[in-house]
């Protein structure tokens, strides 16, 4: 059962809108009028697109969240805002999808059980049985959903059912090696994160380490991005690299890449769970 946490950052208000004077004053005036305690305010003034992005974390002592939501809506209409008001006391409920590679799942499960992941891992779903012991050792239900060329639609319907039944907020593809259909990507609507094992846009698609080896790279990397119908083209959330050299075989690159894949995915899941990531077209704004 997901526990409600009482803390200073009870709510997070994320806003994106065309830039003009008075935006922050209008937003904070509503919060102050309801005696909200602003714990953190961050903003990005995007001069290229003439947009303003803000993230405001605040406590709500006495006011009614529904009344506050209504009054924020009035300001949003006035400034043409796209906005989300998140209840940060309710941890994001995550479903992790895996195939046979367990390093990212292991890392996420460790961080979650150690209390350093602001998401709750409520389900592990896989098209293979290999990682069931790892999930069940951590006390997380594991559901095997086999996928064959002919059974992908049924498998995806089963996944949708599991997402709905478990009130899932975020699907994490932790080296899940199946391409999600356009329909499922649309249905997920920006609530799925994938870890790609290369520094995108280099080496998209399958076997990126083998592609990197053939190219003779001196760094390999990993990219966490939102999932879209266009494979490995989704808005990037986080990337990192690590050095390699001529002496490493493709298998050595695979082994060397595990740590950076796990770290990059964990950062992306944590920042999404803290409502720090704002999607804007093919880009993201990340308020770290
Ligand atoms: N619609 C999307 N689906 C997926 C994405 C994405 O960005 N959009 N990311 C991939 C992850 N991935 C690389 O990071 C990847 C996974 C799988 C494949 C692939 O060719 N899979 C084959 C089956 C392979 C197998 O059975 O072992 C396939 O689906 O036919 C390429 C890239 C996750 N999904």
Image (tube, rainbow, N blue to C red):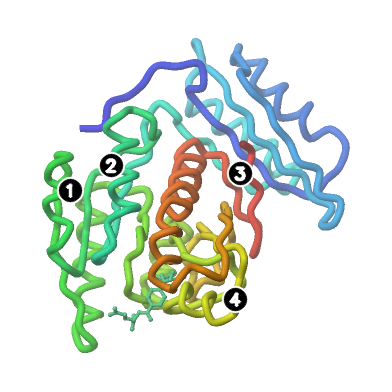
Residue annotated with mark 4: 216
Q: What is the C-alpha distance between the residues marked 2 and 4?
A: 34 Å
Asked which quadrant contains residue 89, the reply is top left
In which quadrant of this rendering is ligand 1 seen? bottom left
Q: Residues within 10 Å of mark 1 (few under 14, many from 20)?
A: many
Q: Is residue 156 above or below residue 89?
A: below
Q: Residue at horizontal 14%, vertical 53%? A: 142
Q: What is the C-alpha distance between the residues marked 3 and 4?
A: 45 Å
Earlier residue among tags 3 and 4: 3
Label ID, residue 83: 3
Q: What is the C-alpha distance between the residues marked 3 and 2?
A: 31 Å
The one nearer the camera, 174 or 160, is: 174
Say if mark 3 contacts mark 1, CB within 8 Å.
Answer: no
Earlier residue among tags 2 and 1: 2
Earlier residue among tags 3 and 2: 3
Residue 166 % position (x, y): 22, 48
Please identify, in this view, whether the residue under mark 3 or under mark 2 is nearer the observer: 2
Earlier residue among tags 4 and 1: 1
Say if mark 2 contacts mark 1, CB within 8 Å.
Answer: yes
């Amino acid at each position: 059962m997901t526990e409600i946490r009482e803390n200073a950052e009870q709510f997070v208000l994320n806003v994106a809108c065309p830039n003009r004077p008075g935006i922050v004053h209008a937003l904070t005036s509503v919060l102050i009028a309801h005696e909200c305690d602003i714990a953190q305010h961050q903003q990005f003034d995007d001069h290229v697109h003439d947009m303003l992005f803000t993230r405001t974390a605040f406590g709500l002592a006495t006011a009614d969240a529904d009344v506050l939501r209504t009054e924020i809506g009035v300001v949003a209409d006035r400034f043409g805002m796209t906005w989300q008001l998140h209840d940060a006391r309710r941890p994001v409920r995550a479903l992790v999808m895996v195939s046979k590679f367990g390093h990212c799942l292991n890392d996420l499960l460790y961080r979650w059980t150690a209390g350093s992941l602001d998401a709750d891992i409520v389900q592990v779903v896989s098209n293979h049985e290999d990682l069931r012991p790892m999930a069940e050792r951590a006390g997380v239900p594991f559901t095997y959903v086999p996928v064959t060329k002919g059974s992908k639609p049924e498998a995806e319907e089963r996944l949708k059912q599991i997402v709905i039944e478990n009130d899932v907020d975020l699907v994490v593809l932790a080296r899940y090696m199946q391409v999600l259909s356009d329909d499922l990507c649309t249905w997920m609507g920006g609530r799925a994160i994938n870890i790609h094992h290369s520094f995108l846009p280099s080496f998209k698609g399958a076997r990126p380490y083998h592609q990197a080896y053939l190219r003779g790279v001196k760094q390999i990397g990993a990219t966490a991005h939102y999932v879209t119908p266009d494979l490995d083209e989704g808005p990037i959330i986080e990337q990192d690299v690590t050095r390699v050299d001529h002496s490493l075989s493709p298998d050595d690159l695979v082994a060397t890449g595990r740590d950076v894949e796990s770290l990059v995915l964990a950062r992306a899941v944590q920042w999404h769970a803290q409502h720090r990531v704002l999607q804007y077209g093919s880009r993201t704004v990340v308020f770290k």
